[in-house]
Amino acid sequence: MEVKRNQLSAWLYLLPTIILMAIFTVYPLIRSFFMAFAENYNYMTDTWSSIGINNFRIILGEGSEFLQYLKTTCLIVIISVPISVVLSLLIAVGLNSIKKLTKLYQTIFFMPYVTNSIAIGMVFSVMFAGDKSIVNYVLELLGIGGQNWLGGVSTYGNHASYVSQMTVLLIYIVWHSLPFKILVLLSGLQGIDKQYYQAAQIDSASKFTVLTKITVPLLSPQIAFLTTTSFIGAFKEYSSVIGLFGAKEGATGGHYDMRTIVGYIYASLTDLNVGEACAGAVVLFVIIMVFTLLKNFISRKQIHY
Amino acid sequence: MPLLIIFSLIIALFVIVIIYKTIEKPSRRDGRLNHNLVIDETIELEYQKQIRREIIAKVVRYVIAYSLLTVAAFLVVFPFYWMFATSVKSAEEVMKMPPTIFPHEIHIENFKVAMQSANFGRFLINTLIVGVFSTLGTLVTTVTSAFAFARLNFRGRDLLFSMFIATMMIPGEMMVITNFITIMEWGMYNTYAAMIIPFWVSTYYIYLLRNTFKQIPNELYYAAKVDGTSDFKYLLKVMLPIASPTIITITILKLMGAWNSYVWPNLITDEDMRLITNGLRGSFSSEDGATVHLQMAATTVVTVPLLLVFIFFRKYIMRGVSRSGIKG
Amino acid sequence: MKKLLAFVLIFTAMFLTVACGGNGGGGNSVNDIPEYTEEQLKDLTATVTFWHAMGQAKTEIIQTMIKGFNKKYPNITVEIQNQGGYGDLRDKITKSIRTGDQPTVAQVYPDHVTLYMSGNAVRELDSYKDHKTYGLSAAQLNDYIASYYAEGKIYDDKGTLYSIPFNKSTEVLYFNASWFEEHGLLEQYGLGTIEKINDVKTFVPAENAHLTWEDIEAIGQYYVSLDEYKNRPASEKIDYYAFSYDSEDNLFITLTQQWGGKYTQLTGENSGEFVFDNQQSRNAMQWYLNGHRAGYFVTASAWNADYTSDKFVSGNVVMTIGSSAGCSYNNPGDKFVLGVLPYPQREANIGKGVDGGELVIQQGTNVALFKCEDPNEELAGWLFIKYITTWDPELSFDEQPTAIWAVKSGYFPILNSLMNSVEYQEFLAGGDDGQTLEAIVAEVGYAQAENYFVSPSFPGTSKCRDEVELLVEAILYGGKTLDQAYAQALASLNK
């Protein structure tokens, strides 16, 4: 009797959550999967002509725009993730080796995390855009010479190349993604047994050897976790592009140069191309699924180790 | 160029002071140690040499560490500084070449102009309403489900929990499309409810709180049961107070989420119902030099509350973040 | 493994459930028009919702018109809703069609109508127009300025009527008359004297004054040859141009056709093709690009802005083409003397008419009727459309809805009778203070009315506009060749 009552009350406690999840998570998930296969879906009348893979054929077909956006997204992932992991590792090791002002530095390095990515994206665009921007000024001072980073008429040429747009975007993404990584790596470092370092000291190993032979291997669970999660995060990059470039998702004169997969999903949705939006979402889902399984696989291995 | 020199001088000075302060103590202690252990002059000499070598190595290491950290910290802080500096400049000063690092005049009225030109007051109220009510709802669902998962035994608990966890890895974009249609069909377009109710459940917070609940010893629960305390009363009177740090973490992160949300309100509302971030990007879309200072003033208004919250609740925010695997 | 299996099973089951529901949702059926006598009509009770994108100030003008409407039909309530910009209005309507909450009447662009038609939501107006009691008389039909009225019939090759003209504008050339005077250009191009432009505030320099594209090019070349320009440092030169165009899509569409090319064409009912990739269009774009490279042609996007007005008023640009409805933004106040001219044509095309490439875009929206569940609401919506767009001989000029709208909003008259009325001509001529800028722009616009063109509308034309805007930007600011830019635009459209 007691057990049964307990059963019932447990489900009662869970009821609001389950109802909300059913409506706003489970149903949409299935529905989106379905609409990805609904051909010629008409949003206004909620009708479709047939079920098939036409939407996927459109977005993955040769020369499609989606593939271009996928390429941009992959570039963001491949470049930003290693750079941010290495940088945050260096900073975390640095933070771990000092004794004074640790709190101050930690606070500073964590600041980008608590910011609004649209707002600070606008700050970065002010820092880079135009001939009179602070970044171009400093580059000129250093004798490197400025760049037309974000488009518009400029003495550096009217056109912001794909590379220069991508550079600004990557700098911003790395800047914004450092805090979380530093935090995770620092707590990992603090958990390493001091004996390892003492042993290394006795062997009078160089600092670099210590870093590569002791610190990195011992941090490998955290590094693996960070790499996979930031792969997932970088595949979903969107608001940084909006912050930096606004609704054009790239420099003036380009063709949505910096649009990402998520950007494509929202653009299609706005155009009422719901079928293609859902197909794009399914592709993203599959990519993220692969990395999630990879992450789980790696972390499971780590537990046994 | 003088600017760069000044900056590097400041940084160098800074580094030297820190290093001096750091290495002062151990060397004095070592000195005292030596004094008590004078046995042989040659050993003493050799020992001092080694200490000197060690100190030099230590100094070099600190110089490298502090310079690296200081340069990195400077790069992290600079965008914030540039935002503040630009936000108080005049329209003419913004366009000046070379750019002025320190504003010549302080134009506080930029903030007033920016707030008025973008209907920010209304956006602020909207954001607060949405933030408060979505947080309240989330707390209710999170506490009840975390309690059920942590304390109650029922058939299918583990399966259900792993399904909950599984939803964490689904990209939100999969849901947005249909939720948008659902909200439309329910006639909730352009309402507060549309921005609140879909966000009443967060599996990550359930996961977070369930883990906190699990750490509370079982004995407390059984003792309460013996006393005839109901589950609900036990939850309110015992578990919630113990788990209050996690509750605070959830509240702060959720409020920050509302403050930063852009995509969903952009889809589901227009004009007066938008939230603060929509107002920011929508009202100052032009990068025309004429409005840069106002744009940065509005950006400052959005950023400062976040930084303040961070400074006061640093511990709670970091606690929540370090366990999340989703954000990055 | 068992968990996974359960998950997959549940998922599949729900997938099938979702797939079975939904399909086959039919379109809205068309109501029969209810029959009432003139007398019964006065007692017709219904609520009409009217969605517009005219902003707060113009909402009040519409309210005045509704008061007049209610004198005639006291039991019809008209609720107006300001939905923000045109894009917002369109998005809001598509969303509302899905849930069946569409307005009774709304402001529409032709490509919007095409979109709503795919949602099966727009009521054809022929049956109302031809109705013996509520219809439009031949005189009323002929009263609409022909090119405006024609825009309601571009949706199929049968010419079915779907909309009635409401607010109309065009593009005109604004120029800095003080600068022209300083350089002797007023005299050189026969634009009259600065005193005339300034003293009576007529803005229009002289009878039949105009500048051709060749003239504008020559002035541009003169502009960059001036020492004042040449001596500027490179970083400042990019802020100074002789001529700037607000809307890149209009630039592309108009110039393509002035140069003898085609933009889009209908191929059948509700379908058409994008034919803008032709030599003439490329010549036009190459010509504009050359001007940009030489330093005198630009568009508003160069400054990441939508309009040139800031740069024009500050004197950085001396000629600009913008919407007649946006004239107040180009008013420099006391900074310099403003002049307004008709839209430039090519020298060789003058006098050849629209078919000969002498053309200028016609802008602005129409009003359309949406299908309603309640036939009385639909009829009331039609009566409202009829009231706000026709001349009622029983009313005085000040009570005429079309006159109230044209005089107060600054949009062009949609009726010949209004245009030719003594009162409207007096408005144009102005009082003791001279003409208002709005009146002048209206006059310039009316003078070029016979050169108006409208592009046909079919699915994709809205996207086509976006694409040609990106095309112009890609050529001017994207470092793309013409080949690349045209190919990109076509690829995006024909995917």
Image (cartoon, coloured by chain):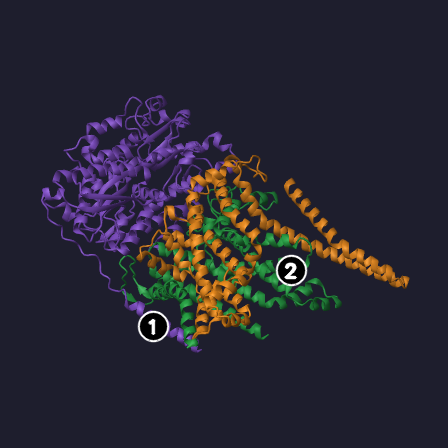
* Identity, as a three-letter code, of the amino acid under mark 2: Val
Asked which secondary structure carries label 2, the reply is: helix
Of A82 and C491, the residue lying toward us = A82
**Residue shown at 22%/50% (left/top)?**
C370
Above or below — where is B118 with respect to B203? above
- Label 2: few (<14), some (14–19) or many (≥20) C-alpha neighbours in 10 Å: many
* Identity, as a three-letter code, of the amino acid under mark 1: Ala
Of A147 and C26, the residue lying toward us = C26
Above or below — where is B54 with respect to C196? below
**Residue A257 in view in this figure:** no
Please tell me if label 1 and label 2 are on a single chain. no
Residue located beneath label 1 in the image = C13
Asked which secondary structure carries label 1, the reply is: helix
**At which x and y percent is residue A53?**
34, 67
**Residue shown at 47%/51% (left/top)?**
B259
In the rendered structure, the answer to whether residue C235 lies left or right of residue C364 reads right
In the picture, the disc for residue A93 is 2
In the rendered structure, the answer to whether residue C348 lies left or right of residue B217 reads left
Snapshot quadrant of residue C142: top left
In the picture, the disc for residue A142 is none
Question: Which quarter of the rendered picture does the N terminus of chain A lie within?
Answer: bottom left
Identify the colour of chain A in the image.
Answer: green
Q: Residue furthest right?
A: B40
Chain in purple (letter): C
Of B223 and B278, the residue lying toward us = B223
Chain that bears disc 1: C
Identify the colour of chain B in the image.
Answer: orange
